[in-house]
Amino acid sequence: MNILLPVDGSALSLQAVHHAIRLARQGLNASFVLANVQEHSSLYEVMVMHDAEALQRVRLTAGEHSLAEADALLTEAGIEHQTEVALGDPAHTLIDIIERFQCDSVIMGAHGMGESGAVFGDVAQALLRNSPVPVMIVRPPPEPESLEEESDAARATASQEADADE
């Protein structure tokens, strides 16, 4: 099984990588394709820099940087994977990557760098609608509603860990 892991370098996209690692440790026999899609340069960027090749190198370097932590996590876990940095519209390009790498499914975060108040980000929504393979969305853990709840949760976790040590 070959699974696409779209990563934009955000903490939310890395949660999907952690989820994939947990699945692999629980026995999922899969290899992964870490992918980052950099959007094409804007007209303004082209006009200011005057060098399309240099702009492309900058985008590819940014993509490699965005994949670095996820790549390190999978490598450290000993999980087989490939990396791909591409240029284009993220949703359409990810579908191209699914087809090119013959991915069987996608595991991705609900939001990336462009997090909004919506349930899913634009790219996640587009993949849910248009992907030729199943898409698993990893949502962020719920945030405590107050600092008091956070403290209560931390105390409960500490108490559970202490009970487990006994």
Image: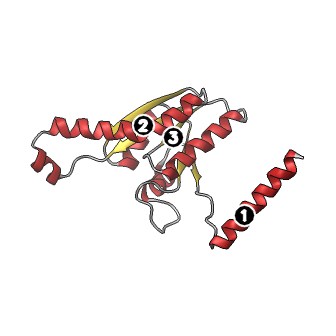
Question: Which picture quadrant has residue 62?
Answer: top left
Which amino acid type is marked by label 2?
A: Ile
- Residue under label 2, please give it: 97
Task: Tell me the residue that label 3 is attached to.
Answer: 5
Q: Residue at x 57, y 29 (%)?
A: 76
Is 120 drawn above or below residue 1 in the view shown? below
Q: Do the residues labelled 3 and 2 touch (CB within 8 Å)?
A: no
125 or 18: nearer the eye? 18
Characterize the local packing of mark 3: few (<14), some (14-19) or many (20 or more) Cα atoms within 10 angstroms. many
Residue 153, numbered circle: 1
Horizontal side of 106 relative to 60 (left or right) equals right
Whether residue 22 appears in this view of the structure is: yes
Name the quadrant containing residue 54.
top left
Q: Can you give x and y, in whole percent of width and height, for residue 123 in the image? A: 43, 54
Instruction: Say what secondary structure mark 3 lies in.
Output: strand
Q: Nearer the viewer, residue 6 or 64?
A: 64
Picture residue at 55% right of the left edge, 32% below the top = 74
Label 2 vs label 1, nearer the camera:
1
- Lower sequence index among marks 3 and 2: 3
Identify which amino acid the numbered label 1 is placed on.
Ala
Name the element at disc 1: helix
In the figure, is residue 79 to the left or right of 115? right
